[in-house]
Amino acid sequence: MITANTREEFVSAYGDIYEHTPWIVAEAWPQAPFSGPEAMIAATSQIIRDADHDRQKALVKAHPELARKFGVDPDLGRLSAAEQEGAGLDRLSEAEFIAFRALNEAYQARFNMPFVICVRQATKERMRQEIERRLAQSPQEELAEALGQIDQIALLRLKDRIAS
């Protein structure tokens, strides 16, 4: 069971599963207890889908650009840093770094948000392929896909939290 005695305890325990966006977990607290991680993410996902466009976009913008800011950005969350490191994004060759940077810039110019993918479920090559594929999507399709990826990231983070 996933629960806490107070909203503050709940947010303290789980608020960071969504990058710099604890309001999502705070809004889920009245629905607790949750039977497991999937149930909690179903609830938080619905909260996100019911949020207005600006809040959805702010959630996506709270995520770091892949590979670009690693080791440089002081706002890079502890969980994101570990995930990017685990995917090898901290060890890119110069050519890979230049390619990711160009793709990040093209994506940012098209969608005005960083490219988000669950790096724990992707290789560097798959990430590159996905950013290229997703550049062809409409802004609405891409926002929906980014939010789906964020749910996957949050689910894995929550499972890790419960396991530890």
Image: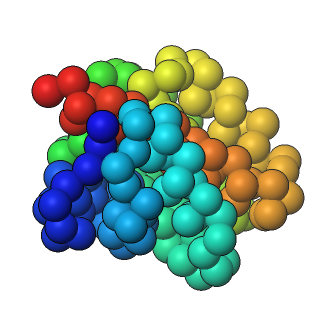
Residue 119 in the image, given as x and y percentages of width and height: 45, 30
Q: Position of residue 58 (x, y in %)?
A: 50, 73
The colour style of the image is rainbow
In the image, residue 144 above or below residue 99: below
Residue 2 shown left or right of residue 57 in the figure: left
Q: Against 36, is 45 above or below? A: below
- Left-right relation of 16 to 8: right
| Residue 121 in picture, x, y percent from top left | 50, 22
| Horizontal arrangement in the rendering, residue 151 relative to residue 52 (left or right) | left
Q: Residue at x 84, y 47 (%)?
A: 136
In the displayed structure, 9 sits above or below 82; it is below
Residue 161 visible to an observer of this rendering: yes
Q: Is residue 66 left or right of residue 157?
A: right
- Reply above or below: 73 against 82: below
Tell which of 137 and 101 is nearer to you.
137
Q: How many marks?
A: 0
Q: Residue at x 23, y 32 (%)?
A: 162
Q: Position of residue 38 (x, y in %)?
A: 49, 35
Asked whether the viewer can see residue 98, the reply is no
Q: Nearer the viewer, residue 67 or 10?
A: 10
Q: Residue at image x 56%, y 65%?
A: 47
Name the quarter where the C terminus is drawn: top left
Please identify the quadrant where the N terminus is shown: top left
